[in-house]
Amino acid sequence: MLLPGHKTGSASGMPHPRPLAHCPIIEALVDLRVAIGPAVTAEMFDDAVGLLAERGFVRKGPIVEQTVTLGVGSDIAEPHASQQLVGTRFHSSDDLFVAQFTIHGFTVSRLRPYDAWSDLHRQAAGLWDLYRQIVVPSAVTRVATRYINELM
């Protein structure tokens, strides 16, 4: 059974997806976590600034990981905080895409208005090639996609 406005477009009888007038997706992303060697540092992403500029991306800032250790009992009286530079965030010139290059992995987000998976996939594939050249991961340990929807 087809919903009004749907047309079959293949021999399988599957309907063509129709664009939503008000798509609820405010962010869609591709996220890959990687295994790297000890020689990889966040400073290595400085080498990507020029190459990303050629693709229309600008550096927007560092990505810092902060750790706070709290003691239990009388052994540690004061909390201890430390921070480490783990990567760099880049934005496309139109602010529709955000790329995060970190020592833990690689994330590309497509911000509102979300249009199509093919746009996000194409951007992620090209940036992944660049990330791999810099980091040379020994393995990909996780691949994920996420969609963030605004329902109200």
Image (tube, rainbow, N blue to C red):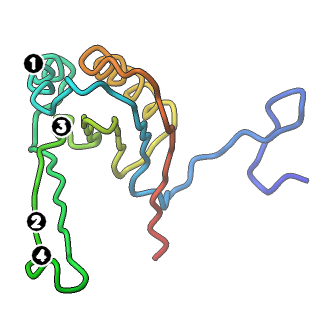
The Cα atoms of the two marked residues, 2 and 4, are separated by: 7 Å
The Cα atoms of the two marked residues, 3 and 4, are separated by: 33 Å
Can you identify the residue that label 1 sits on? 50
- Nearer to us of marks 4 and 1 is 4
Q: Are marks 4 and 1 in contact (CB under 8 Å)?
A: no
Q: Is 132 placed above or below 27 here?
A: above
Q: Which is more toward the observer, 135 or 74?
A: 74
Label 1: few (<14), some or many (≥20) within 10 Å? few
Q: Are marks 2 and 4 in contact (CB under 8 Å)?
A: yes
**72 relative position to 119: left or right:** left
Q: Are marks 1 and 3 in contact (CB under 8 Å)?
A: no
Query: Which circle's residue, 1 or 3, is located before the other in the chain?
Result: 1
Query: Which circle's residue, 2 or 1, is located before the other in the chain?
Result: 1
Can you identify the residue that label 4 sits on? 79
- Nearer to us of marks 2 and 1 is 2
Residue 93, percent from left and from top:
16, 35
Marking on residue 140 = none
Label 4: few (<14), some or many (≥20) within 10 Å? few
Q: Is 10 placed above or below 77 here?
A: above
Provide the secondary structure element on which disc 3 rests.
strand
Q: Quadrant of residue 48?
A: top left
Label 3: few (<14), some or many (≥20) within 10 Å? many
Amino acid type shown at disc 2: Ala
Can you identify the residue that label 2 sits on? 81
Amino acid type shown at disc 3: Phe
Residue at coordinates 11% horizontally, 19% vertically from top-left? 47
Q: Which is more toward the observer, 99 or 133?
A: 133
Provide the secondary structure element on which disc 1 rests.
helix
